[in-house]
Amino acid sequence: MARMGGQRRLKSLAAPKFWPIMRKVHKWAVKPRPGPHRMEYSLPLLLIVRNVLGYAVTAREARKLIAEGHFKVDGRVRKDYKFPVGFMDVLEVVDTGETYRFIPYPGKVFKLHPISREEAGIKPLRIENKTTVKGGHIQLNLYSGRNLIVRLKDPRNPEEDKYKTMGTLVVTVPEQKIVDYIPFKEGNLAIIVGGRNVGRVGVIKEVQRGWGRKRSLVTLEDATGNLFQTSLDYVYVIGVEKPVISLPEGAWK
């Protein structure tokens, strides 16, 4: 990594392969700031505005639009052109009312999928870990680095603690109010967020536990009845009988 003008820069050739940039034309690419998503699973807001949505021709134009507050991510205006937008994030174009969800997509890693205004108010977040905090309440550590405190009426009653690791919370954005919970279990619907099967959707058929998530295998069945396997770490539950989010045509029946 080199420094240009006192700022850390990213060489285009070192950028994730799915980034829509001309690697042989431009030596440098925008490096996203540390944030809710890792670089290999996100895009800087500038690239979305310029390269994906086409609202700007140059980086200068894109930076100006972003700085003026024309774009929201998960219901909040983002003015940092390096802000990383990643899986399950909701992007809104303030002036036009267009709303999109950043979802995994076969062969391309991601797709900015158009969604309705109603759907733009929710976001599914996988539970990565959970801890007990002061008072016996539960802190849920969620995908993309968010944390939620679940206050129990009676911390001594285990039935109140229904949220399990690898399950998915459906929360409102930006308020982060829990409106639904989808447990990770056989029979539920999931989308794959990494590996060679990224973007595929299927019903969980079997889980073979190994030493940790990366060494545990999950067998799923897609809409055409084909079975495929992937690491547990890549499985993201999105529904019971049908997905709680809309998907590209053909992704699921």
Image (cartoon, rainbow, N blue to C red):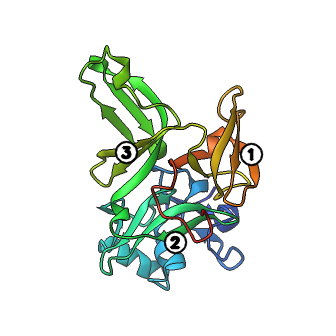
**CB of mark 2 within 8 Å of CB of mark 1?**
no
Tag 3: residue type? Asp
Element type where label 3 sits in the image: strand
Pick the residue in front: 240 or 197: 240
Question: Where residue 127 sits: x, y (%)?
Answer: 47, 38
Is residue 88 shown left or right of residue 80?
right
Q: Quadrant of the N terminus?
A: bottom right
Of all residues shown, which one is farthest toward the bottom? 57
**Which comes before the other along the chain, label 2 or label 1?**
2
Quadrant of residue 162 within the rendered picture? top left
Of all residues shown, which one is farthest toward the left? 153
Q: Which residue is mark 1?
A: 229
For discs 2 and 3, the disc positioned in front in the rendered view: 3
Residue found 74% across the figure and 45% down from its top: 229
What numbered label is drawn on residue 47? 2
Is residue 23 shown left or right of residue 120?
right
Question: Where residue 140 sits: x, y (%)?
Answer: 40, 33
Q: Which residue is mark 3?
A: 180
Tag 2: residue type? Leu
